[in-house]
Image: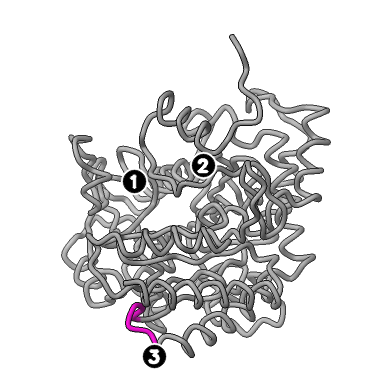
Amino acid sequence: MAVLEHLTSQQAIDLENKYGAHNYHPLPVVLSKGEGVYVWDVEGKKYYDFLSAYSAVNQGHCHPKIVGAMVEQAKTLTLTSRAFYNDMLGKYEKYATETFGFDKLLPMNTGAEAVETALKVCRRWAYQKKGIPENQAKVIVCENNFHGRTTTIISFSNDEVARENYGPYTEGFVKIEYDNLTALENALKSNPHVAGFLVEPIQGEAGVYVPSEGYLKGAKALCEKYNVLFIADEVQTGIARTGRLLATCGNCSCEDKNCSGTPDVKPDILILGKALSGGVYPVSGVLANDDIMEVITPGSHGSTFGGNPVAAAVSTAALEVIKEENLAQNAEELGELFREELNKFIPTCDLVVKVRGKGLLNAIVINDTEESSTAWDICIALKENGLLAKPTHGNIIRFAPPLVMNREQLMDCVSIIVRTLKDFEVKA
């Protein structure tokens, strides 16, 4: 069979359309190279990446330290399964638990796997430690959540596109309004067998919804009051994206923004993924202290690839890069600059309603309906001008560049966004 080389963009798109399942609707650009904040298409055109693989590439594309760690470990030992010990996993677990301030790490591969793992840990804790009757444990979740696409997770989603024709759905979840402490306490009062509260500190996929000041603190206090585990899904918001090592760190006063020493909120269970590997390898993890994690015993949960030596080497390097390059501090400073600059422009533009976000996780809300193609068309125009972003929820455009971006690059990107919106408004 002939191997196709030097594909054009259209040839690559045609191949995916013919031989791949159509479970995504990509922007029509075919990428073949990445470095830092930039990506190039197969014809050699250069773009700013303003999505970062949904915040997986916080450390920038092909970071030499992270790629180097992967290559070196791959030359030595790639996989043992957990049937045996390996010489990398324990060192990684020690580094990760010390970095995030927990006793134990349960290593997995993908974000959805980590969410499923956290739910299993939470339920086991509820039955073994809290004394909830078997099969009665409830987990409270928020409307407009996005925690992945497994059967269990879509069971508590209200995204009908993600749910349609996948039933029957998994029971045991109570859905409440996000950013509403009264709703949370009412759910805790009216459901005596609640095991945990699963929440995104910022709802990214829903359109970068940042909750009210004090919401996360209040939610954690209610969880403590009712003896319920606070489970933070930081797959997208974690690893310096929001200007702190974790979004649950909130507006902590730590001088070192890359630590989690005195956070606003300390989750009982922390879920990480995406940038835990810098985007070069599937790595995720669930962290908790001994009194919770000790419910996991041999045979009760596992993964062939979870905790493999390459993942351990890669994730250690990825976390080291965050600290060494002060990426949380950079995200905080550039995020403030980004919103400040766009807020200067928005009053002059009928096309954009607002900009919102925290750190370098931001979004603009387009003045049109969710059913319109306006946000998509703007993203096509941004692509033509050298910047890649994607809409979410129809009329919202998410902006999340790699955290290695510098001030000059950010201002160049602001210029591209403003110019594109101006031109689009004139043509409209």
Residue tagged by mark 1? 127
> In front: mark 2 or mark 1?
2
Density class for disc 2 (Cα within 10 Å; few <14, some 14-19, many ≥20) is some
178 displayed left or right of 310: left
Locate the N terminus by quadrant.
Answer: top right
Residue at point 25%, 63% (across, down): 370
Residue at point 34%, 62% (across, down): 206
User: Magenta stretch containing residue 53, yes or no?
Assistant: no
- The first of marks 2 and 3 along the sequence is 2
Residue 228 visible here? no
Q: Mark 1 belongs to which amino acid?
A: Tyr
> In front: mark 3 or mark 1?
3
Density class for disc 3 (Cα within 10 Å; few <14, some 14-19, many ≥20) is few
Q: Mark 3 belongs to which amino acid?
A: Pro
Viewer-nearest residue: 403 or 1: 1
Q: CA distance from mark 2 to mark 3?
A: 41 Å
Residue 129 visible here? yes
Residue tagged by mark 3? 347
Q: Quadrant of residue 158?
A: bottom left
The part of the chain drawn in magenta is 347-353
Identify whether 274 is placed above or below 330: above
Identify the element where label 1 is drawn.
Answer: helix
> In front: mark 2 or mark 3?
3
Q: Position of residue 151 (x, y in %)?
A: 30, 38
Residue tagged by mark 2? 110
Identify the element where label 2 is drawn.
Answer: loop
125 displayed left or right of 155: right
